[in-house]
Image (tube, helix red, strand yellow):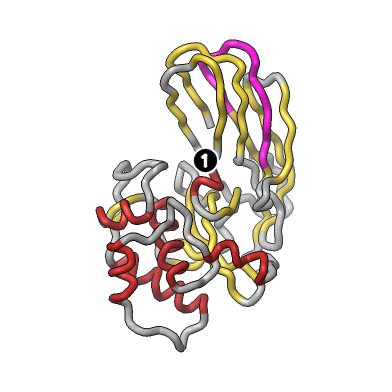
Amino acid sequence: MSLDFERPAWEHSFKLRCFPSSDGRQKISGEHIKISPVHFSSSERDSFGNMCIYGTAKQVHTHFSVDVGGIAETDIHGVIPAESHKAAIFKYETPLTKAGVNIREFHRSLEPRGWMGEFERAVYVMGMLCDDFSYVSGSTGIATTAEEAFTMRRGVCQDYAQILLALCRLERIPCRYVAGMIPGEGATHAWTEIFDGGTWRGVDPTHNRACDDTYIKISAGRDAGDCAINQGVFYGGGRQTQTVRVVVSEVQPGKNSRP
């Protein structure tokens, strides 16, 4: 991730959420991170369990960059345990995922599905969404709400994920936003996790499929705002241009390769 400033910036305090963590479905090893410039940095987990890196770049700079690498050993059959009372917070809408008139009308148009389990209902809703929504790069921004994107019937992976969150929360299904990586994207990707029988199961509404071993999770939260890659404050700077580049390549088991 790189951040280019229109004018010199200084006293730059930052918070980065760009470091995958090990859980029941992925084991992270060989990790390394390089931040430039940096005066001080530390790390800790936020309230959702995401690894965050905090720091400052006191010196004057017009370019800020973060390089993260490592090896993720994934197993889609692993379990990410979750207790029902802790998952309950993910039933409630947020400003970015609040269902408006159009999402509610679409939800009412869906066929009765009370006989389905929660995960099966989420998959059904995902399929119906994908029939009624189109991927159009650049059509929305980071502040676009689920209702705004759905009204236009177009968006990117963030919008697919947040609209599915809005629909599932109308179903009273605990669900959360996930930011991560998959091969071939070139940038970060977003999908949704559904609470199902004491564990979290991932679905990708952008591609209308269940997540498999190729998905590497970076962070999870109530919506995209909880998973922002980079946040910060600084003096100077003017306009900023952020660029994110993701490279995911498969390494055969037993090979000692450092990306």
| Picture coordinates of residue 28, whole percent (x, y) | 71, 49
Name the residue type under label 1.
Val
Residue drawn at x 40%, y 84% as measured from the top left: 113
Pick the front one: 188 or 7: 7
| Picture coordinates of residue 112, whole percent (x, y) | 36, 84
Disc 1 target residue: 246
In this rendering, position of residue 8 left or right of residue 16: left
Classify 10 Å Cα crowding around label 1: few (below 14), some (14-19), many (20 and above).
some
Pick the front one: 32 or 87: 87
User: Is disc 1 placed on a helix, strand or loop?
Assistant: loop
Position of the C terminus, as image quadrant, is top right
The quarter of the displayed image where residue 18 is located: top right
| Picture coordinates of residue 110, whole percent (x, y) | 32, 77
Relative to residue 151, is residue 243 depicted above or below? above
Q: Is residue 13 magenta?
A: no
Relative to residue 130, is residue 7 depicted above or below? above
| Picture coordinates of residue 137, whole percent (x, y) | 32, 45
Q: What is the total number of numbered labels drawn onto the structure image?
A: 1
- The magenta stretch is 52-65
Residue 211 shows in the view:
no
